[in-house]
Image (spheres, rainbow, N blue to C red):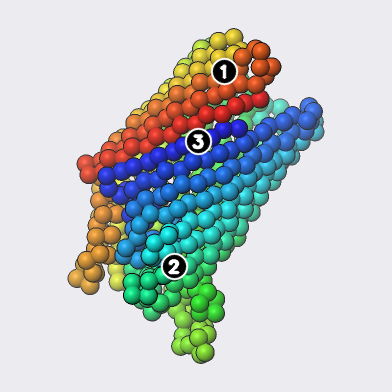
Amino acid sequence: MGINFEHRDANRHFQLETGTGHSLVNARVASYLRLDKHNTVWGGASYQIGKKRNIRFNSTSDYELLYPYVMADTIGGNMENEQYAFNGGYAVKLNQWTFGAKLDFRAEHEYRTIDPRPRGISTDITLRLGLAYDLQRYRLGVGIGGHTYKQTNNVDFYNPLGVIPEFHMTGLGTDYVRFAGAVRSAYYKGTGYIVDFQLTPLQESGCYASIEENYMPYQNILTELNALPISQLNVYQTNAQIGWKHSGRLNWTAYSGVNYENRKGNEHIAGSSSSTEYKSLITLSMFSNRKTDLHIGGGLNMGTKHCITLDARFGFIDEKSEYVDLKREMAFTKSYGKLSGQWLWRSNTHWIFEWNGNAAYYHNNSKRIIMPYACMDKQITQLVNETYTAKTEHLWQLATQIQICHTPEKWKGVGVFLNFGSEYSHTPTIHQIEINSSAGIVF
């Protein structure tokens, strides 16, 4: 169990909708228990509280999940954050078969105490089941899972003279004009699936492979208009990797992989109202966002009591966002390289010292933007241009982390740990620092 503090601050926004920084405190407990040689259980719980700063053009929680379909206003501000989470799992091994199940739950509350006063309450549940079979040289595993998400979102004003419009954003600076203004309540829901396949060598050397497919639809519903659905976001994600590992005096691995995400946004066009009841007449596919990350890499590991690990990864990123009418487009490509290292030192069984460090550079190769600037207002133009600049600039990242764990012999298996880490991100216009520290006990 332990407590963690995380602080992030930037001079400008990397993403206006997620703010320039945050200060969060998290308390957590986790356990892992081997019941016998066949059965294993594990679980954990955490509580988080803190503040997210300088959020603009976003009044909805979980922006990374739901974008571009969020409520927004032109003022923004800080958001208070509170989160509860727990997880648990069970695995059993019978001869060559292994079965496992895992449950993750998150409940989050974000709000602001000055006008405009957005409030978002979200719940997130993921259940995964897995089955593995040991062949002569390899372990073959398959898994399935389900994911359910809900959020209630509303914006209030306590000062009747200070009411401003809320917009229902639809991507690349566009919004659902018909319901802009006084409609300040929304509801998000969705249920999706997860499928994965794993191949792992049972011997010291061999090929390994993994592929995971995720699909999640998010419906955006206006609760004030008799639960009128105005949009649906379909998110498809594929992560695949294949490689070879070798174990010996010098352990090494080489791999290649791809991470792909496709976000497709459909807008429902509503007819005329009848007693504040609207009917959806037609659905139009208006927004799309595609991200592809192709990469190759390799790692080296040497030592036992004093262990050194080095890893290098090189890749190519291609991202493109489009809105159909009026034509809008934002696209870029980047090449990147990452180098990371770890030094692990053990003294008998009472002291463990671990250092991690990494450096990364993202180089912009090309960029393109198409916008109907003639019919865009000043604030939307600022939103689009700042987003484009932040996404397409060259980026440096440097990070380091130190962890110390001590288990005195007199404490009979009880120990303490301390952890401190920092990360610095730099572009020609943005400088960001993130620090985190934690302390706790283990037993």
Residue placed most toward the observer, 428 or 56:
56
For the image, the number of numbered tags is 3
Residue wearing tag 1: 406
- Left or right of 343: which side holds 160? left
Residue 300, x across and y down, in percent: 47, 20
Within 10 Å of the Cα at label 2, are there few (<14), some (14-19), or many (20+) other Cα atoms? many
Q: Examine the rendering and report whether any part of residue 388 can be seen.
A: yes
Residue wearing tag 2: 155
Q: Answer above or below: position of 377 versus 398.
A: below
Q: Answer above or below: position of 10 versus 108.
A: above
Residue placed most toward the observer, 85 or 102:
85
Q: Mark 3 belongs to which amino acid?
A: Asn
The kind of secondary structure element at disc 2 is strand
For the residues labelled 3 and 2, the Cα–Cα distance comes to 31 Å
Residue wearing tag 3: 4
Residue 144, x across and y down, in percent: 65, 49
Q: Examine the rendering and report whether any part of residue 195 can be seen.
A: no
